[in-house]
Amino acid sequence: MHDIRIGTLLEGRHAVQVLPQIIPHGFESFGLTFWQTTGDTDLAETGRRVRDIVEASGTKISSLEIFGNPLTGTGDDADTLASWERLIDHAHLFGCDLIGGFTGRLPGVPLDASLPRYAEVFGELSRRAADQGVRLCFENCAMDGNWQAGEWNIAHSPDAWEMMWDALPADNIGLEWEPCHQMVGLIDPLPQLRKWAHKVFQVHGKDATIAWDVIRESGIHGPKPYVWHRTPGFGDTNWTDVISILRQSGYKGDIAIEGFHDPVYKGELEMTGQVHALNYLKECRGGAFISNPVIGEPEVAETV
């Protein structure tokens, strides 16, 4: 069943300490994340130690991820572009070939105004990655932006994806897709996934609950929340359908549970929710692997 592994996301700087504690729960892979910068993390040493841990347990590192704005190079994002480069260069030490994150965005201008800078920055990064057998993928999170303005990411809309692929055709650039962010925009994720599954390099395991009663009464601009990010198994998405669509498209990758967002299973219940999601997604994947009967060649009767 490991053509689609079920794992979770961890902060990269804590991976060596956390991995031995949660591997026994049954996670099959791990994505390691950094916020805006890899900071003072010794990626070479961390990679060696992490790889020893996961190889001994039969798990793997599915991705390295850096979330910041690599297009501006200012303020807290001053090191984000260099962090993309470092993760690309060190991916092999983790036994990993996938780097994820946000595209970045030019603040305060319409989305399409960021495309030339995106093509410039990720043109160089995609070539650097291709030289090392590494792929790049972008999470589909708007980070409170829209088409008119935003601070973080242009890869949150199917219309933007079309423009991105046109601006920078590269086989090693794809999507880090999850249904949650589309549902926040009231998009049905399943028909979108059917169309775009061929560009999905990684799936984040995060769901959403949409309060349609609130929308019908107050709309989406009133004082009441109309949607919540959820851990898989507690939201509205049919993950059996998600996995079926992925398999039909030939996807062989990971679903990395993105925790620390659920409004109920949080705090001391965080790992309770994540392990529930792990077991739920394994069931949606089809449960335990059962081998088929082996049918041999029919016996030929001896003749006298």
Image (cartoon, rainbow, N blue to C red):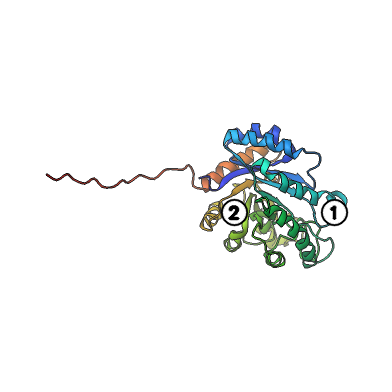
Residue shown at 35% from the left, 44% from the top: 294
Front residue of this view, candidates 216 and 263: 263
Q: Residue 217's image quarter?
A: bottom right
Neighbour class for label 2 at 10 Å: few (<14), some, many (≥20)?
many
Q: Residue at x 87, y 53 (%)?
A: 74
Tell me which residue sits at (54%, 53%) in the image.
243
- Are discs 1 and 2 less than 8 Å apart at CB? no
> Could you say whether the residue bearing mark 1 is in a helix, strand or loop?
loop
Which quadrant holds the C terminus?
top left
Q: Residue at x 21, y 46 (%)?
A: 300
Look at label 2 and name its amino acid. Thr
The local secondary structure at tag 2 comes to: loop
Q: Residue furthest left?
A: 304
* 142 shown above or below 268: below
Residue type, mark 1 in image: Gly
- How far separated are the C-alphas under marks 1 and 2? 37 Å
Viewer-side label of 1, 2: 1
Q: Which residue, given by chain and number where applicable, does mark 1 sit on?
A: 73
Q: Position of residue 1 (x, y in %)?
A: 50, 45
| Residue 118 horizontal/vertical position (percent) | 77, 61
Q: Which mark is residue 38?
A: none
Does the image show residue 63?
Answer: yes
For this rendering, which residue is in front, 3 or 151?
Answer: 3
| Residue 268 visible (yes or no) | no
Disc number at residue 237? Answer: 2
Q: Position of residue 56 (x, y in %)?
A: 59, 33
In which quarter of the view is residue 273 placed?
Answer: top right
Q: Check disc 1: other Cα within 10 Å, few if <14, some if 14-19, many if 20+.
A: some
In which image quadrant can residue 95 be found?
Answer: top right
Task: Judge left or right: residue 160 versus residue 290.
Answer: right
